[in-house]
Amino acid sequence: MIEDEIHAPFLPEFKSPVLESKRSATGGVASVPGAVFNVSTSIIGCGIMSIPATVKVLGVVPAFALIVIVGVLCDFSVDFLLRFTNAGKSTTYAGVMGEAFGRVGSVALQICVMITTIGSLIIYLIIIGDVLSGSQSEGSIHFGVLQEWFGIQWWNTRAIAILFTVLFMVLPLALLRHVESLRFTSAVSVLLAVVFVGISSVMAVLALWEGKTQSPRLLPEVASLSSYFELFTAVPIIVTAFTFHFNVHPIAAELPNPSKMVSAVRISLVLCTAIYLTVGFFGYLLFGDSIMSDILTNFDRDSSSPMGKLLDDTVRLSYAFHLVLVFPLLNFSLRANIHELFNKSSPSALDTTRFVFHTCCLLGIIYIAAIALPDIWYFFQFTGSTSAVCLTFIFPGAIVLRDVHGISTRRDRILAAMMIILAVITSSIAISSNLNSLARKS
């Protein structure tokens, strides 16, 4: 008996009828590499853009430690979610919350997913607009790639450039009905993120060789108590960069063996942590204290050589295209959660007309918000301090402490309590610091 328990699989295969129906609909053709690419794409998103800015705020050592710690805690929280999904009847994050806390829990989860995904998708379009049509930050004007190539024209203004991207690049991908259909675009998006990190690293090494870099600050500068508390505003940025939990269940549901999702998540977390550490260090090394909240903005600098200018444009365009490919993956979870909130049927049961209508309405709302909201730093801090931290740490920890299936160990409960306490404390301090900062500026 004991030997059988020791050799039992860590996460046995799901047996719920709901999941079996999903497998029938998708053909069960999803693979572990496809899941790794989809999870990695969900993680990387646009959070990588603000990682170098958090390194500037925290210093290299604390920032690296925070990235690793958040990555490890995310592994634990996903483990909690999958184990409780396996123990219950539901196959969605909202369903697991509903089993633990009833209708209130599932609705709270769905609202947080909508806030986080809508916020992220708005940020994606803002960054794409910055790359193509430029931006204005702290009194300085940064030209976009299209403006640098063709001058300022009516067709490369921010509103037109983003609209063209949404209609002809995002919309066709957003109309795909299954997550597994995005595995190839996710693979390309991860490759583009690696290209971005690789070129940035090479440019930083060359700048270091030429003596054009500043010495990176290993520890933060704390001049007063208020500046100490402002360090906590970097925590939500890292949390947002690792928020992918709303995509765990849709990706796992399309795997022939959902127990493989544990391995896919861990591989993705290791890969993305390495990418974050690399871009954080070399991005900060390359631009120093002049780094913007969106590092792509820094790549519009004048270059002394055509090759340098080509590298700058390649970095910006590769990551803008990466965000285009990430967009439909988050849009999938947003659309599915909205449907689950207001309907009892499965999202795949939607007729084509309603499916297209819902997708177009969501894209229209996100497009309008991206035009109206030009700054991403406070958006990151807001979502990271509220909905993202709930999805990543507070809700999984609460599910473990509630333990409706009686499977939590003493270690699980201690870890869950620590996750919730740390999340609440850091988020409260970050929100207070942000409010004080906004009050001083006004």
Image: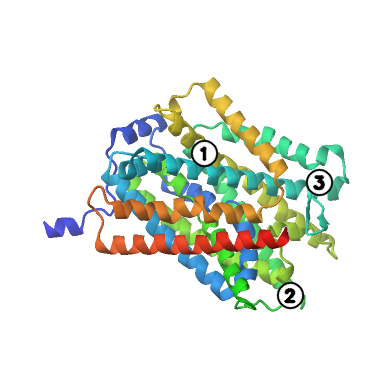
**Which mark sits nearer the N-terminus, 2 or 3?**
3
Q: Residues within 10 Å of mark 3 (few under 14, many from 20)?
A: some
Q: Is residue 212 above or below residue 441?
A: below
**Distance from the alpha carbon under mark 3 to that under mark 1:** 31 Å
Horizontal and vertical percent for residue 208?
Answer: 72, 75
Mark 1, secondary structure of its residue = helix
Q: Quadrant of residue 168?
A: top right
Give the labeled residue for mark 1: 334
Neighbor class of circle 2 (other Cα within 10 Å; few <14, some 14-19, many 20+) is: some
Q: CA distance from mark 2 to mark 3?
A: 28 Å
Q: Which is nearer the N-term, disc 2 or disc 1?
A: 2
Q: Calculate the distance from the C-alpha at mark 2 to the C-alpha at mark 1.
A: 41 Å
Residue 69 image offset from top left, x and y in percent: 46, 67
In the image, what residue occupies the spot 46% across and 40% down?
A: 110
Residue that numbered label 3 is attached to: 146
Amino acid marked by disc 3:
Leu
Residue 90 in view here: yes
Tell me the element at label 3: helix
Q: Residue 214: where, in percent of width, then height?
A: 72, 77
Q: Which residue is mark 2?
A: 213
